[in-house]
Image (spheres, helix red, strand yellow):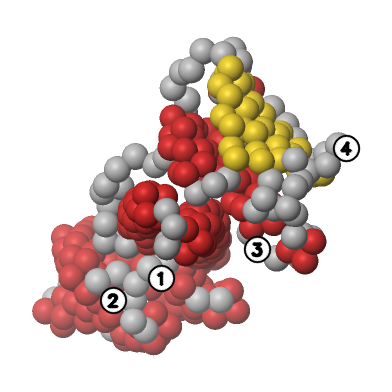
Amino acid sequence: MRIRPLAVDALIVAALTGVALLLGPEAARQGHHPLDATAYALVVLVHLPLVLRGRAPVVVCCIVHATWLVYITAGYWSVVCSFGAMLAVYTVASVRAPRVSVACAALMGGVWIYAGAVAHTHDWSSVAGQALVYPAMLWRFGTIARRAAELARQLRREQAERARREVAEERGRIARELHDVVAHHLSVISVQTGLARFVFDTDRLTTRTALDTIEATGKEALEELRRMLMVLRAADDGAPAGPMPGLARLGEMTDRLRSGGTRVALTVEGTERDLAPGVDLCAYRVVQEALTNVLKHAPGASAQVRLRYEPHQVTVSVTDDGQGVIPARVGTGGGHGLPGMRERAKLYGGQIDIGPQDRGGFAVRLVLPTSARAAQQGDDTTT
């Protein structure tokens, strides 16, 4: 149980003390000594320590019962001060281990039997029953409250751990996004720089075109990096400054590669339509990564990009003819490229095939469902 503020405990103690003082006049009608000023002072002293029950529950419980014993020994009606003792036992049971709370409950039962002996009661069965039932019920209720508090703390810990895992997963996703963006744009810039250096003295127009492409590619890379890095700013709850790229920008990507001397053809089949943002971005990033691999591993190859819209899915494929492949760069196994493509496909319920072609070259084929029902099928459809 969470420790209550002093103000709340003070209000509770004030309420219990008020009830006890109002019950005081009933003592004479129950055949006990009427309460005088000393009795009322003891009533207040019994309840007053309960203000600190959240800070030292066991000590407060012992003080309350000790003062209650003085009140009972003076011959006053024990029931008047019983509320404070009950609250003290409940508090100990709700915040302390059973071995401690059981002892405090037994203490209350012993004081109750002592009160019956001082009052010379003739109904010992009733006194014994009350001495057993009341402490047991209070102990049980307090134990339930303690277990509920422990479960709540465990739930908060699990939620915090889940939040940390989600943050780690999101950082991994951002790392893959950054890999795709940086790798693609730097590959384009590298190709364009080599072209500009090669024709710098012989073809000023081609050189200017290459430099323009380098400038545009650098600006686009910075724009995408800025959008994604905004996600890392904890204080920024707003949406990104602009939309993420999608299949509508495949033409820009292939044009940029062609201007650098890479032979890339784009074919679009079916009726173009708007896709869900996540599906659109997934397909775009897979094509971007596949073309980046062509630039890195087979800079002299020609590539073919095919985009086909179907009623319930969209298919994109990137193939190259394998010319100009650099064996030293193939099969190194590093980086986020191929694993990132597979994770993207799995995230959106798609299927991706990656591997060499029988006639030479390399192929990447991605099929993504565009309907909610299709996206929910088989989470493990990547190959």
Location of mark 1 (residue): 91
Label 4's element? Answer: loop
Specify which label sits upstream in the sequence, 1 or 3. Answer: 1
Question: Disc 2 vs disc 4: which is toward the camera?
Answer: 4
Q: Distance of mark 1 from mark 4, alpha carbons?
A: 77 Å
Quarter of the figure that contains the N terminus: bottom left
Location of mark 4 (residue): 358
Question: Disc 1 vs disc 4: which is toward the camera?
Answer: 4
Quarter of the figure that contains the C terminus: top right
Q: Is residue 143 left or right of residue 3?
A: right
Identify the mark at residue 335; answer none if there is no mark: 3
Mark 2–mark 1 CB contact (< 8 Å): yes
Specify which label sits upstream in the sequence, 2 or 1. Answer: 2
Q: Position of residue 241 (x, y in %)?
A: 27, 47
Q: Position of residue 234 (x, y in %)?
A: 32, 62
Mark 2–mark 4 CB contact (< 8 Å): no
Residue at 50%, 49% in the rendered image: 260
Mark 1–mark 3 CB contact (< 8 Å): no
Q: Position of residue 331 (x, y in %)?
A: 79, 60
10 Å crowding of disc 1: few (<14), some (14-19), many (20+): many
Location of mark 2 (residue): 50
10 Å crowding of disc 2: few (<14), some (14-19), many (20+): many
Give the residue furthest to the right.
Answer: 358
Residue at 73%, 63% in the rendered image: 329
